Amino acid sequence: MTASQEGAARQEIEELRQRLQEYSYQYYVLDAPVVEDVEFDGLLRKLQQLEEAYPQWKTADSPTQRIGAAVASGFGKVRHLEPMKSLANAFSAAELQSFHGRVTGALGQDVQYVVEPKIDGLAINLCYQDGVLLWAATRGDGFEGEEVTANVRTIRSIPLKLRPVNGVVPALLEVRGEVFMPRKSFQRLNEEKEENGEAPFANPRNAAAGSLRQMDPQVTADRELDAFLYGHGVCEGLEWQAHSEFLSYLKEAGFKVNPLYRLCSTMDEVVVRCEEWDTLRHELPYETDGLVVKVDSLAAQQLLGSTAKDPRWAMAYKFQAEQALTVLLDIETGVGRTGVLTPTAVLEPVRLAGTTVSRASLHNEDYLREKDIRIGDTVRIHKAGEIIPEVLAVLPEKRTGTERVFSMPKHCPECGGPVERLTGEVAQRCVNSACPALLREGLIHFSSRDAMNIDGLGPAVVHALLKAGLVKDPADFYALNVEAVAALERMGEKSAANLLAAIEASKQAGLSRLLFALGMRHVGVKAARTLARAFGSMEALQQADEMTLMALPEVGAKMAVSILEYLQKDAVKLLVVRLQEAGVVMTEEMTQEAGANRLQGLTFVLTGTLPSLSRQEAGVLIEAQGGKVSGSVSKKTSYVVAGEAAGSKLEKAQTLGVKVLDEAALLALLAE
C-alpha cells in the first residue's frame, strides 16, 4: 500500500471520528439526534473496519472505544458502583453464529441463551440500599452518569422499596434497565406539543430521554414513562445461578420485567426467535430496535468476562431500520382543534412497516425549511416510533428542477380567516373562534377514547352530523334522536340506536373525562384528573382563582391562566349549563383522604443523617401528604429537615431565615 493510500485512510479515520463524536454529543448530551441509528451504526462499523486494518492509528479516545458519552452539565454526577457496559451488535444470523462460536470455543461446551426484546429508550441504573431506592442515574460514560432520582421516582413501574424475596432484601443492589415512552403516550405528547405550537419529538426514544432529563420532575411525571428492568451491577446479600433466575427475582422483588423474554437451548433457536421478531415487533405497544442475546449461566458469564467496552457473553441483534423512498406529490394544510395549521405530505403510496403509506406529517413551516422539503421531491420516509409516517430526508440529487417550494397559507384554508404565528411558537394558528375546523376537530376530540369515550362517534359520523346541521357544539350530541341519526348516510336504525346508547352512557363518564373532552389548552388527561379530584365538581372549579389552581402539583402558571380564560368565556358557561341540563355528570369523588394534602404548597429540603428515617423514607412521607421535596435551598423553601452532619444546606437555610426542623419536629408536623 502506498504512502498516499495510507494517508487517505488516516484522514478518513479522523473525519469519521469527528462526525461520530459530534453525533454522540447531539444525541446523548443535547437530546437532539441529527442522524438515524442506521446511519450512525453504519459509520461506526466503517470506522471499526478501518481501525482493524490500521491498528497503529487506533486510539483510546476513538468512538469505537467509548462506552457512553459525556454527562450533561445540568445534573449532578453519580459514579456507578460497577461500570455499565455497552453491547456489541450483530446484524445477521451469520454474525450471531460467529458470536456462538466464540462463546462455545472459550467455554468448551454448549450453553443456553436468554433472548430479550431490546427496548429503544434510555439506559438507567437504580441503586437500592437495604431495599430502598437510594439514587438513580443515566448511563453517561459508563462510569459516571446523571443523577435523575427525583424524575425516576415519578415512574410508577419502578419500585421505591423492594419486596423481600424469601424473606431477604439485599443490603446493596444496582438494577439496570431501560426507561421508555409507550407509543400511545408518544403520539399523545406530540399531538399536545403541536397543538401548543412546540416542536415535536422525533421518536419515543428521544422523547423518553428528554423527559427523564427534565429539571422539573412534574414534567417527567406528565410524560407517562415506563421501564423494563433486566440487569444488575453490584449486589450484596443475594446470589443467582442464571440470568433467567435473576429475571424471576426482579419480578418477585417488584420490578417490571419484559414478559417476552425466552430461554433458548441452541443458537438455532435464537436465530429463529430473532427472525420472528423482525415482524412481530410492530405489534408491541413500545418501540424496539432489536433483541439482546445473553448466555444464561452466570458462571459462564464470569468465565467469558468482558472487553474494555462490552461483555463477551452478550450480543445485541439489531433490526434493519424500516425506511422507504417515495415521491412527495403535494402538501396539504389541515387545521386542528386549537387552530394550529399543520402541513401534511401527500405521497406516492409505498409499503412501510407493514402498511401502505400515502400521507406523512411535516409538522410545521420550520420543519419544511430546515429539511428543504419541496413538492415533487424524492423523499426518504420512516415511521416515528413505528406509528406516525414522517419525512426523514430529501434526496436533492434526484431533483429535476421542476420541484416547487411550499409556503404556508396566509389565510385559514377552512374559513379564510387570519392566520397568526404567536411569539415564541413555531406553529401558525387560525384565530377565528368560529372556524368550522375548530368545531369539527373539537367534536371529534370530545367523543374520543380518553375523553367521553363515545363508541361509534368517530370522525366520519361527526362529519355527517355537521353536514346535516344536527350538531353545533358537544351539548347537541345529547339532543339527538334515533330518527335523525338513522337518516344519515350509511346509518340505519340499529346503528343509530347503538350510537345513542353510547352517547347516553357517556353522561356517566365523570368530571375528569369531561374536563379533558372540553379541550382546554395545556390540560391533558393527567391534569384533568388532578383538577377533578382536587375540586370534586365543575361548580367548585369555576369558582377557583389562579393561586388556588397553581397550588396543585401539576398546574403551572400557563395552565392556570388557560383554564381561567376558558371557563370565563360566556359561550363555555352556556355550554356547561346545557351539558348539565342534559344529565352529564359534572362531579367526581375527591379520593384524597382527610389530611392527605396537609403539606400542599410546602417545599422541604432534607440534609444530613436522620436518627430513624432515611432521607428517602422521609421524602416519601412528605410527598404522601402533598409536600414537595427539593434538592436545593432557596427563599421559597418552607422547611429544611436537618439531621446529623448537616452541611452547607443547613448553613444556607440559617442565612436565608428558613425554618429548620429535626426529625421529631417533622414527624409532629406530619401527625398534625
Image (cartoon, grey):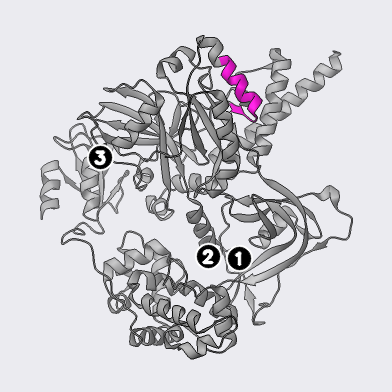
Where the C terminus falls, by quadrant? bottom left
The residue type indicated by label 1 comes to: Ala
Please, is residue 660 above or below residue 19 in the view? below
97 is within the stretch colored magenta: yes
Cα distance in 3D space between marks 2 and 3: 36 Å
Q: Residue at 31% of width from left, 69% of height from top?
A: 532
- Return the residue nearer the eye: 377 or 31: 377
SS state under label 1: loop
Q: Residue at 43% of width from left, 64% of height from top?
A: 524
Q: Mark 2 points at which residue?
A: 196
- Give the percent coordinates (x, y) of residue 530: 32, 64
Residue 658 appearing in the image: no
- Return the residue nearer the eye: 508 or 36: 508
659 is within the stretch colored magenta: no
The residue type indicated by label 2 comes to: Asn
Which residues are the magenta region?
89-102
SS state under label 2: loop
Q: Are marks 2 and 1 in contact (CB under 8 Å)?
A: yes
Label 1 neighbour load within 10 Å: few <14, some 14-19, many 20+: many
Cα distance in 3D space between marks 2 and 1: 8 Å
Q: Is residue 352 left or right of residue 208?
A: right
Q: Residue at 60% of width from left, 65% of height from top?
A: 427
Q: In this view, does 544 lie to the left or right of 420?
A: left
- Give the percent coordinates (x, y) of residue 497: 45, 82
Q: Mark 3 points at which residue?
A: 616
Q: Name the residue under label 1.
A: 427
Ranked by sequence position, the earlier of labels 3 and 1 is 1
- Give the percent coordinates (x, y) of residue 348: 77, 59
The residue type indicated by label 3 comes to: Gln
